[in-house]
Image (tube, rainbow, N blue to C red):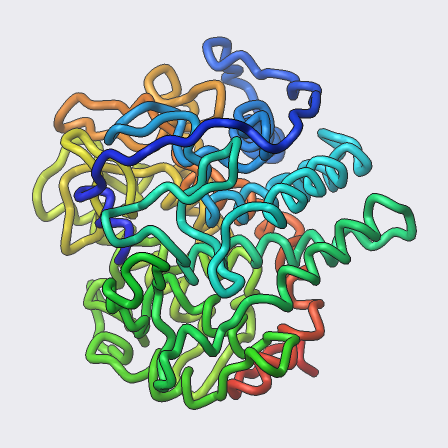
Amino acid sequence: MKRLLYLFCIAFFSFSLPVFAQTEKTPLTLFDAKARSMNLSDSTLLDLVQKQTFRYFWDFAHPVSGMARERSNTTFGYGNEVITTGGTGFGIMSVIVAADRKWISRDTAAKFLLKIVNFLLKAESFHGAFPHWMDGATGRTIPFSRKDDGADLVETSYLFEGLLCARQYFNEDNGTEKELRNRINWMWSDIEWNWFTQGQEVLYWHWSPNNGWAMNFPVKGFNECLIMYVLAASCPNERYQVSPAVYHRGWAESNFFKNGKEFYGIKLPLGFDYGGPLFFSHYSFLGLDPRGLKDRYADYWEQNRNHTLINREHCIRNPYNFKGYGEICWGLTASDTYNGYAAHSPTEDLGTISPTAALSAFPYTPEYSMQALKHFYFNLGDKIWSDYGFVDAFNETQSWYAKSHLAIDQGPIVAMIENYRSGLLWKLFMSCPEVKTGLKKLGFESPWLK
């Protein structure tokens, strides 16, 4: 979907005059990327990958805002000043994991997240929604594309997927955690979800103070945006709620919503033929627990697992004879590639494997994801293991190995491995009373709703 717009991003203006105070933060202990151990248990390897990947959101966080930088390299005319709204939501989830696993103290994590929240309260927003990109020092919007210079409702949804998990986790009766919860609630109650319907029965992705609704992007499923509709239905402010019709007549009414066909002998209930890039089954489900989650359209555990299995089977069959593909080397999703950026999938296969694809699928295919993880670390680690975990992608046919990391790819690795191991983020998000109300409103079933 929108990830394809990376191909068309243009130069933008940076802003100066920082208005938020910087704070000191102890760097996380570094695992030397060049000194990989070849004798690790599965559990120790998972610990290592989660912790090393978390460093992207800790050591490389923007020093003023604390938010996640869009990427680790300078490209497309932008650099380290650019912070990402959705990637920060994923990063917030990784901070929760770090606190829960005691890589950092609970108090340190709470203060760090409060720093982010205080920055967001002063940053530019539009009808309660944040832009895709901001300047990490000033909070001013950096255009994602020429007309995408205002509210991004999908990226805002990823941000609040993380913030609501933080609100549920940091529940102690002390000043920092109370303030964190209160300020998250202020912002959560201020998002004008119904504004983004334009009075119609569908949600629109963008609105700009300069260009209005010119982007004209009604969001219809199935893709990575389910979380937006869930949150819109869960809005705690009655003035800004949307009706169930927005979900059933907007999201669920498109020519690529229902599928039901088989690909490589595996049934796909929803979505594009062959499932599309794997981030479709990751982003919304970092918090939204797909286990037993059903509505009138699909069983979302079946949807996400089968989507993953189709993607893996495509790599095993390898119809284009790309080098390296196989049972232990699979995973097509949006990422950097040797000639730019692409939303990789079985129908857009350039020979580029993105580690986040298989690793963020751990809950769905733990045995197969572990096989891929061991291959990435033990066999390819000298080329793709780094200070922030695995690099964004690689293409052995082209002898190309990325040097870059992207927040939206690193974050799901930490979060989804944790959901596989403990279910932590699923427990937090699904414990939100507003989310339970919203899911019921849309007609979902879930063990969490009983």
Residue 240 figure quarter: bottom right
> Depth check: 346 or 429 in front?
429
The reply to whether residue 383 is visible in this rendering is yes
Tell me where residue 436 appears, x and y as whole percent.
65, 77
Q: Residue furthest left?
A: 320
Tell me how many marks there are.
Answer: 0
Q: Looking at the picture, does residue 250 appear above or below residue 221?
A: below
Tell me where residue 325 appears, x and y as whole percent.
22, 38
The image quadrant where one finds the N terminus is: bottom left
Tell me where residue 347 appears, x and y as whole percent.
14, 55
Q: Residue furthest top?
A: 35
> Depth check: 280 or 194 in front?
194
Q: Residue, x 32% and y 33% (percent of image)?
A: 13
Is 358 on the left-hand or right-hand side of 57?
A: left
The reply to whether residue 379 is visible in this rendering is no
Tell me where residue 235 appears, x and y as whole percent.
60, 75
The image quadrant where one finds the C terminus is: bottom right
Q: Residue, x 58% and y 23% (percent of image)?
A: 59
Residue 380 figure quarter: top left
